[in-house]
Image (tube, rainbow, N blue to C red):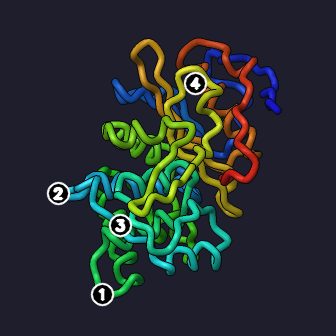
Amino acid sequence: MLVVIPAASAHTASGPSGITAKGAFLLDTGSSKTLWSKSADTSRPMASTTKLMTAVTVLESANLDLKRKITVKQAYRDYVVKEGASTADLKTGDKLTVEQVLHAMLLPSGCDAAMALADNFGTGSTIKARTASFISKMNKKAVSLGLKKTHYDAFDGISHGGKNYTSPRDMAKLAQRALKSKTLRTIVKKQSTVQKATNGRTYTWYNTNKLLGSYNGAIGIKTGTGSDAGPCLVFAATRNGRTVAGVVLHASSKTSRYSDAAKMLDYAFHSSTAKTMNLRQLPQGAQQD
């Protein structure tokens, strides 16, 4: 079944109309020009959009080998069960490449995959130490990128200390940086992927971002939903060689974050796609985020 987004005016002179999100930002990634914003510098929880920084931290690691094998540990599975978190359903003992684990984190929003990356790209003698060290790397990356309203206390957005937050402007800057990675761009625009572990096990993952396949030109990037964060979306689209990235934090509903994004993109592209956009539906049993 297709969900029809309610009609709304494409844009007004002052900006897109009817945006429900508490915070939003629209950025032309080519010129770095701010196109529109709402509470741009107010920090808010970001839920699983945190995983965008997890991905950037991994992808910008020194001497990165995307074909390096990561062995799935039982601890990763135990973690998602304990937290009731979104999962890529990684199986204990399976070996997957770093690139495959990035797919597992960015498409179905697997917190098990995020933990696997943090564990393998952090330093220390225990999983706890390694993941903590990786989160420290995320914070150092945020500082280096000038993200002054951003802080991480989780590798996946599941915060127990309340210190996992960003601002719409900061997240848009991060999206701009992330899109410079060909690997990340290739991954986040996929609506689904089939990946094989070294033992032959096949994984099929669906992208939780319903803007893909629904909005003409959409190329990503990451969903997020949390009790404190509300529905969030980091998105991007390219039309006529121009790429625009945007952020909505704490939208009024999971569906409205997509209509917010479409209205914002319409404002940037001077189009009216939001009026007739039909949201792509995920298969039964697929992860929702």
SS at circle 1: loop
**Quadrant for the N terminus in the image:** top right
Relative to 243, 83 lies left or right: right
Q: Which residue is mark 1?
A: 125
Front residue of 71 and 259: 71
Q: CA distance from mark 3 to mark 2?
A: 16 Å
Question: In the rendered image of this protein, does residue 139 appear above or below residue 93?
Answer: above
Q: Residue furthest left?
A: 63
Instruction: Name the front one of labels 3 and 2.
Output: 3
In the rendered image, residue 241, in percent from the top left (x then y), is placed at 39, 16
> Which of the marked residues, 1 or 2, is nearer the chain's N terminus?
2
In the rendered image, residue 46, in percent from the top left (x then y), is placed at 56, 56
Q: Which residue is mark 2?
A: 63
Q: Quadrant of residue 121?
A: bottom left
Instruction: Name the front one of labels 3 and 4.
Output: 3
Instruction: Name the front one of labels 1 and 3.
Output: 3
> Which of the marked residues, 4 or 2, is nearer the chain's N terminus?
2
Q: Quadrant of residue 73?
A: bottom left
Q: Which residue is mark 3?
A: 70
Relative to 10, 118 lies left or right: left
Residue 53 in view, yes or no? no
Which residue is found at the position 38% from the left and 71% from the top?
71
Q: Are marks 1 and 2 in contact (CB under 8 Å)?
A: no
